[in-house]
Amino acid sequence: MAMFKADGKFAVLIAYFKIILTYRAMMLIHAIRLLLLPLVLASAWLSIEKTASNPYSDSDYLLYYLLVPVIMNLTDSRVVFKFSQAVKDGSLNRELLKPFPPLMSYLLESLANNALQLLYLVPFTLVFWLFVRDRVLLGHLKPSLLLFFVVAIIIGTLARLVVSGSIALLSFWIEDVTTLNLILNGGIWALLGGMIVPVATFPENIRHIAELLPYRYMLSFPIEIFSGRLSNSEIYIGFATATFWIILFAIIMHIIWKSGLKTYTAYGG
Amino acid sequence: MFNMPVMNEQVHEYAIVTKALNREFKVRLKAEGLLASVRNFFSPASKTVNAVNDLELQINRGDIVGFLGPNGAGKTTTLKMLSGLLVPTSGSIEVLGYTPFNRDHAFLKSISLVMGQKQNLWWDLPPVETFAIHRQIYGLTDAEYKSRIDELIAMLEIADCLETQTRKLSLGQRMRCELAVSLLHQPQILFLDEPTIGLDIIMQKKIRSFLLDYHRRFNPTILLTSHYMDDVAALAQRVIVIDHGNKVYDGHLTDLTNKLHPEKIISVLLNDGEFVCKLEDGCRLIHHEGQHYRFMVSRNRVPELAARLYATGNIADLTIEDPPLEDLIGQLFTPDSQSR
């Protein structure tokens, strides 16, 4: 903590808290955005008739989509939008001129944003839970499961951060990475991460693919742990798979960063 | 290239040394029309532009050097290479014994680049918050921070705008706050890219006077680019002129002025009547309105002619000045001046 404070990271994190708190309306809009789609999806899944092969009951869907906005928010990363903008308008210059890790600033901004978003999301989630609490079963929860849940969220956040970071750093060469981000980090993430459909309800062969890719660990995996649907060995395999992707993308990010700085033209002031 | 920083004041008598410094940019080209767009889609055309060509610099510690040149001459590109933002295509740079592009934290703590009014300030926070963050990042002690910030606030007269959100400050206030944050860590080298651009004349003078005062007290090396020649004339003893990436002049400003324009302007305001003297060789009238006259006079004849004008006893005011620096520098970049 002393190191964190001494080299300015804590001051920068607090600065982002202050900035985000200045724009309260924007926070509320983000919270509504995060809540809206899962609500619609939950309603859709609850209204259709379940087949015998579907492992999810109405109660499972309710718990799943209650947690989706919270996990989506906690693992969210704004690095693609912020970094590509900084490369385009030259505001990356100011980060490069400070004796401070340049990418750390974007990480801290995401962290501050995700933490403060909980000010809206947690109360909203609790209110929804109150309405459906007799249909959502939480009796299986125990401390070890909650610990796995927290670790899975941290791993999911890191996985999303390094995947997003790798896409963001392509801004050194690609004028607009937002479309690429929309495909890789939006569409594919929504599908294989379990936003549209819980991964556990996928057909078996697609589920196996989803379990091998990093997307599941950014959203579905922590909720599957919280729901008590995974055995300890499945949880450990999940942690190992996600860690592999985190290390791989961290290396990719490092290579792209080193090479990108050499091509950076530092436009603007 | 110099990879290992050796911070030895005696070894590094120069603050900045560049050798055969080059920077190229690849620029995409596209002709007009739909067909050209389609052709460009399959086979993008580009050309390489040399923004800086074989630039050799040696700048002493504590000097203030004006970096002049028309738009696109390579001034800002050079500043960006010297501050570590851009990697040179070839050649070497040594700034305080460091290779800037390595971005050693010790190097970054020794420099500041001021480029516009939102380089260092946090746009959504008041300046006082930026100062506090800057203090943490640069590892200033409480005592250092307190004494420096108090001094800068007083010198720059910014006490009244410290708690206003930066985006709501006027251009002049922002510039002064930008300077304050840039100097908080007392950099040994200050790169100033157009520090007075967009400011009114009063604010330009305040900034110049502050920079001179600051330099007198702390003796940083300052490399300055400006389109306002008054900035350069007021601050820099030495100027480096570059054009199309090539250095075309490096020396004292007065030598450049004498070389380019061996004349001075004498402005005279008469008490009454008209000027009736006969104009002699080396003296010509360039402006006349009422009782105000302006003459262009050979430098070697200025003392004698000024004395004779006073001797007429009809002089209400007399001033002697150099021709505008803008005109002089403009001459450097006209085609027929290239042979100078």
Image (cartoon, coloured by chain):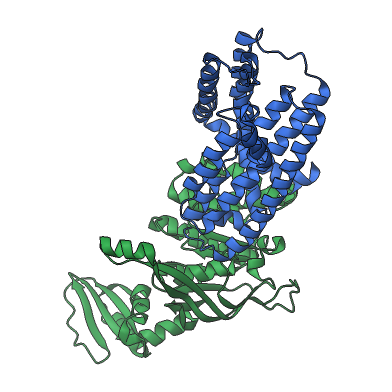
Chain colours: A blue, B green
Residue B121 on image: x %, y %: 55, 48
Residue B41 on image: x %, y %: 37, 62
Residue A233 on image: x %, y %: 81, 33
| Residue B312 visible to an observer of this rendering | yes
Residue A203 on image: x %, y %: 61, 31
As drawn, B260 above or below A216 = below
Question: Which quadrant is the N terminus of chain A positioned in?
Answer: top right
Residue, x 75% and y 73% (percent of image)?
Answer: B6
Residue, x 38% and y 77% (percent of image)?
Answer: B329
As drawn, B129 above or below A153 = below
Q: Quadrant of residue B212?
A: bottom right
Residue, x 25% and y 76% (percent of image)?
Answer: B294
Residue B63 or A236: which is nearer the viewer? A236
Residue, x 19% and y 79% (percent of image)?
Answer: B275
As drawn, B124 above or below A70 = below
| Residue B147 visible to an observer of this rendering | no
